[in-house]
Image (tube, coloured by chain):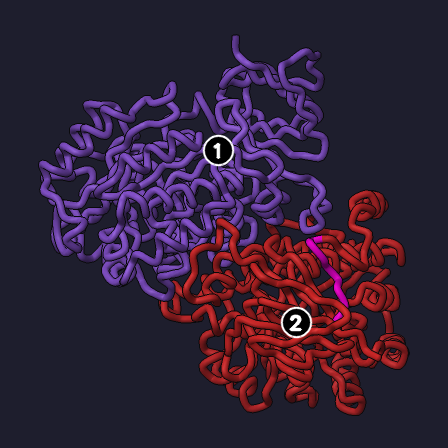
Chain colours: A red, B purple
Amino acid sequence: MNKTILIQNALIVTVNPQMEIIKGDILVSGKRIITIAEHIDPPADEIFDAEGYIVTPGFVQTHIHLCQVLFRNLADDLSLLDWLKKKIWPFEAAHSEDSIRISARLGIAELFLSGTTTIMDMGTVRHQDTIFEELAKTGMRAVAGKTMMDFGERPAGLQETTAESIDASLKLLDRWHGFDEGRLQYAFAPRFALSCSEDLLRKTADLASEHGVLYHTHASENIDEAELIRQRFGVSNIQLFDKIGAADGNLCLAHCVWTDSADRQLLKEKDIKVLHCPSANLKLGSGIAPIPDYLDQGLTVSLGADGAPCNNNLNIFQEMRLAALIQKPLAGAQSMPAEQVFKMGTINGARTLGLEKEIGSIEPGKRADLTFIKINQVHAIPFDNIYSKLVYSAQSADVEHVMVDGKWVVRSRALQTIDETALPDAVHKQIQTFHI
Amino acid sequence: MNKTILIQNALIVTVNPQMEIIKGDILVSGKRIITIAEHIDPPADEIFDAEGYIVTPGFVQTHIHLCQVLFRNLADDLSLLDWLKKKIWPFEAAHSEDSIRISARLGIAELFLSGTTTIMDMGTVRHQDTIFEELAKTGMRAVAGKTMMDFGERPAGLQETTAESIDASLKLLDRWHGFDEGRLQYAFAPRFALSCSEDLLRKTADLASEHGVLYHTHASENIDEAELIRQRFGVSNIQLFDKIGAADGNLCLAHCVWTDSADRQLLKEKDIKVLHCPSANLKLGSGIAPIPDYLDQGLTVSLGADGAPCNNNLNIFQEMRLAALIQKPLAGAQSMPAEQVFKMGTINGARTLGLEKEIGSIEPGKRADLTFIKINQVHAIPFDNIYSKLVYSAQSADVEHVMVDGKWVVRSRALQTIDETALPDAVHKQIQTFHI
């Protein structure tokens, strides 16, 4: 028998197709939401009084680098290519299994405590099993894959051949795709075109298609990167993915800051997913992605904090707020209304990952991934439009309880699957081992 | 005899001229800091163990509208002039003494809980005594003044003649300037040129000079506002202040987004202070102020959250983070290093208010305005450069204790001078009285 949990008296932001807001109850059985109604009669195995809380779908961030969390606050004031070459690649190359484990755990701790329950992660060249193990143990929902980089300048610790890269990816896919009734899924993750041979990019596209999994990479983040790709391949970064046969609804492209009208047409035609990372785009000086255009065209745009060293948080509230604010000087104050941005952090993220029937909204039959947000914080009252409150004034620390698959992962701001008290010392100990 | 407090084992971010970071102790006596050292021997009336905390100068926000806090989350997606005419002025005009009191109290509660200990406030046309009463009672340090608006389109509740506006300002100056050994000070606060007669702007400049107080107003926030001012006065907004005799080191101009090279030259020559409000500039679609240019020229630039309805918080951490991030796509990833931004939120704010000998850094003889920030939060570790941690990854809820003039105003996140539990109901009750 599944355990049942009856959540009572919540202010429920459903994000269902009617965008209903319901003051009422949610019945959870096992991993799934069974009923949502103004009143649901007990009994249930657990009764949870959610008076004073807004309950939202667990947030979805579609572009995260768990392996970089350990390098938070250690790589400021650099643009993308310098940031990678001088800091991030040497750091990643120096990772041990232990340091990757702590990095992932630290990231998951922060993500849970700020209400994110699903991520797509761009992993690491080596030790990717360790990231999956942490995702498995902590209860995070994730689509993840090892970073693939078989080409170009990179430290020895990140070098691999095309065959090694593909072989390692396939083994990981075999081990982890579908874990825990689908909570963990695999995605192929070539780093970006500059770090990959055309052969790798092409073979990976075929394999993603063959296995029905996502193809997760970076594209058109930085103007210099975009130009280098055009020089090497003779086409734009977005066109390149079409040329190698990867351009379809399973292609997930982080950034897409530098696109022209042909690129945008292709994004639309092929239903390519755009992973928007506003903090990272600003911090690395990359630019402001033309998100209002993408949304007007009907593209699926979701949000991600990217890596901690280019943010320096993994906080969906900051990403939502910034996604709205940064467009207004150019696209007008009326652009990016809060409700639209809130969808980017929830249902659009689910749609990006092909999980829109499972997560991203609070509806009967969906997974019980829920975030409980305090309603009466002095920094977020009063409110009329609840999306304005959630996008512009709510803070990560307003998240009080979080559930994934019907299991509490945060309760009264205490992590249930991670020993938070042990993290600072472990983080300090691991970062001491790096000499970069 | 003054009460003494010995703060031990803190990580002290002094913001002194050498920008020293000291692991050690702070001795406070009465309202002032007496000693800072690696070790200070007891006794003291109170011993406070600050192990695990970063202690920073209390943050200074130089542009706030306490009377607007009640309208948080109620005025999204509008550009400046529409936002004022359709929402903010009707709201402000409908304020009662009771509603202003709750609005100010709510704002001060949020400011304290996010570590801000000094504000410059642009007040309200009527009931300004109420704002001063709340500032007096709660222990906030403030430079404040009634909003002056004797010209142009505005609701009946905000109308006043030139003589009434000046008379009311002088009475308030007489009552409040210098209150509590200088904790409260008065500033003349003409709203902006479009709401003021040239006569009012000119007379106020003379009076500010005569009384040695600040002249606080908005300027060149929005491109349409700037153009209307040029049409009416025949000069740019910045030049107008020179023309009417207000351009000196006591002139504090919020925004300065739309300035040309002649304006910038004038800002520099006259030592005019720029109050930068990055969130508000984005949310109202106003633009991105050329802050790196201003800093390169040696201007004093400080930070403010502006009004809650155009932000929608009053959170210095968000303003610091955003002040850094938004410049990087245009001015380069290396622009706005975290240390420089941290100064904008502390010592530059003090300098703007003419209080650089009293606040803005942790130095012997200065007022004991201190903010205690948790060091080991999972979203903000690890760190090497402490300013990177404070500007990019710290959150408002990391503020655990706050002191103004040697008195605790926040202790273990509990407000000491405001009944936080009563605020939500009071806010709800007051906002119900508005029908806009």
Q: Is residue A14 above or below residue B131?
A: below
Q: Which mark is residue A62?
A: 2
Q: Quadrant of the C terminus of chain B?
A: bottom left
Give the camera-side residue of B363 and A151. B363
Residue pictured at 9% horizontal, 42% vertical: B161
Do the numbered discs 1 and 2 sit on residues whose CB atoms are within 8 Å? no
Residues at marks 1 and 2, CA–CA distance in whole angstroms: 43 Å
Q: Give the image location of residue B16, x and y in percent.
A: 55, 25
Q: Secondary structure at mark 1?
A: loop
Give the camera-side residue of A197 and B393. B393
Q: Give the image location of residue A199, x and y in percent.
A: 78, 83
Identify the magenta region: A406-413
Write down the quadrant of residue A169 in the picture: bottom right
Q: Is residue A414 above or below residue A330?
A: above
Residue pictured at 62% horizontal, 37% vertical: B412
Chain holding disc 2: A
Crowdedness near tag 1: few (<14), some (14–19) or many (≥20) residues, C-alpha within 10 Å = some
Q: Is residue B35 above or below residue A75?
A: above
Residue flagged by tag 2: what amino acid is it? Answer: Thr
Q: Is residue A146 left or right of residue B159?
A: right
Q: Is residue A411 magenta?
A: yes
Residue pictured at 69% horizontal, 68% vertical: A117
Q: Is residue A58 above or below residue B193?
A: below
Give the camera-side residue of B215 and B416. B416
Q: Which mark is residue A389?
A: none
Q: Give the image location of residue A93, x and y in percent.
A: 82, 58
Q: Is residue A126 visible?
A: no
Q: Is residue B309 visible?
A: yes
Q: Which residue is mark 1?
A: B417
